[in-house]
Image: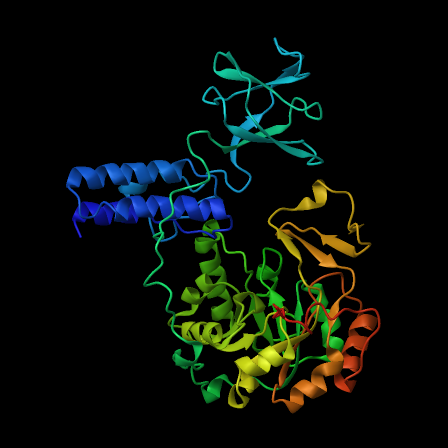
Amino acid sequence: MPELAEIGINALKIEGRMKSASYVATAVSAYRNVLDSLNGSESQIHDAINAGESILQKDFARSKTAFYFDSPEARWLDPQQNGGTGISLGKILAVKGSINSPTKSKWARIHAASLQHGDSIRIHRADDSDRQTQKIQDIEPAGEDVWIPIPEAFTAGDSVYLIQTKENPKHYAPVIPNNDKGFRRKPGFDHAPSVHLNPLEKLHRLPEGLYAAVSRIEDLYIVQSVRPVKVFVHLNRSTAPALLKNLPFSPAEIVPMLDPYFPQKDESALAPEIQSLLDYGYRYFAVNNPGHFSYFRGTDAILIAGPYLYSFNRYAASFISRLGASYLVTPLEQNRQNVERTFGQSERNRIFVTVFAYPALFRIRADLSSIYRFNAFSDNREAHFQLLPSPDGSVVLPERPFSILDKIHFLQESGFSHFLIDLQGPHLKKVDYKDLMAAAHGNKAIPDISRFNWKDGFYQVKDD
């Protein structure tokens, strides 16, 4: 492969979570442009690289991250680029009545001289009470600004985002040949290689029993009233410094649990925090993102893969195990049959099954306490939810918790021996905690709970 082509392909490497089909099409189109030019001249390769860069610069994906990729060839890559919602065009500067167009009742002035006929925008109310999308049909230049027609619901101060340009449509030429001959045969599942979890060292054995998880330091003082085997503590800005002080549990009894959201800006800040915890005597850590494993290479830390690493099948579980996880917490989107199918009898003593939790239905990376003045709301099906804002982010939880405390006995009969009571959610009360532990030890059901989707698991096979 020519050296120039290697530079070009590296320059197109962007890391991030691909969510929309539009973004996938954009990224594939850019890569395809470079790959298809590799047998051409240096001039053709150079042109293809420029075209690929142009496609990625104009995409409407989430913000980019570079992580381990940073070179002069990718200076055009902006990690702070607006994404998801679209490319920000700023706020509406002013509004006025129609201009030579009786069908439009309101026009808005925005600072976007490059906006053209056929582009599509989305307008957001300042209080987020309304969002509308429209294609630009009329436009009036005004120096470095433009006047565009907008719906009546919007006014000065509302935000405007470019979500599609006329010359950069969402549809790209297909990369799969029209004739699928030669692509129809697929390997059978029964021929897939068998996979295993890495052997568990004797020194890494965790005692059987009930474990708890909390997100506040003050909850440790409640949890000590009926002590679990160990306590998982969510590692965030408020708990990190407190974990280096005297607590009702020793470092050997606490498992710092890393957040599943792992932005690039946190990479360097998290390293000294983890090192401080290791130096203080912490040896057990719960990780929730593949990027977390690198922090513990060369240490004697014992890692537990959290529920956000999604060990839904043996291949996922084996992959996580080979990264360095000695234990795994099953995802909440699970059922007993799939757990038993995924882990054999000899492996079930290293699996944590969550038996109580407030599932985080949405995780918002912002403190919404200053935006929304409520903590409880309902949907159009009369289901009730709680909003828990904090400086580290906000979560939406169902009002009714998930519980299979009454199923612990059956899981024990199947060979599972480690159970997690996840108390991250509403403020914990001692009387409620004691009731939960009594129900867990007695294999009793508790009232007003849900099974979440424990019965059906992550998916259902529909009959034809």
| Residue 142 vertical placement versus 22 (above, below) | above
How is this picture coloured?
rainbow
Q: Is residue 82 left or right of residue 210?
A: left
| Viewer-closest of 228 and 397 | 397
Give the quarter of the image for residue 134: top right
| Viewer-closest of 295 and 410 | 410
Q: Is residue 404 left or right of residue 312?
A: right
Q: Residue at x 76, y 55 (%)?
A: 385
Q: Is residue 403 left or right of residue 149?
A: right
Percent position of residue 417, x then y = 62, 86
**Residue extending farthest top:** 100
| Residue 440 vertical placement versus 387 (above, below) | below
Percent position of residue 41, x then y = 15, 41
Residue 282 can be seen in this image: no
Image quadrant where one finds the C terminus? bottom right
| Viewer-closest of 313 and 406 | 313
Percent position of residue 68, x then y = 35, 53
| Viewer-closest of 115 and 175 | 175
| Residue 326 vertical placement versus 362 (above, below) | below
Q: Residue at x 71, y 40 (%)?
A: 371
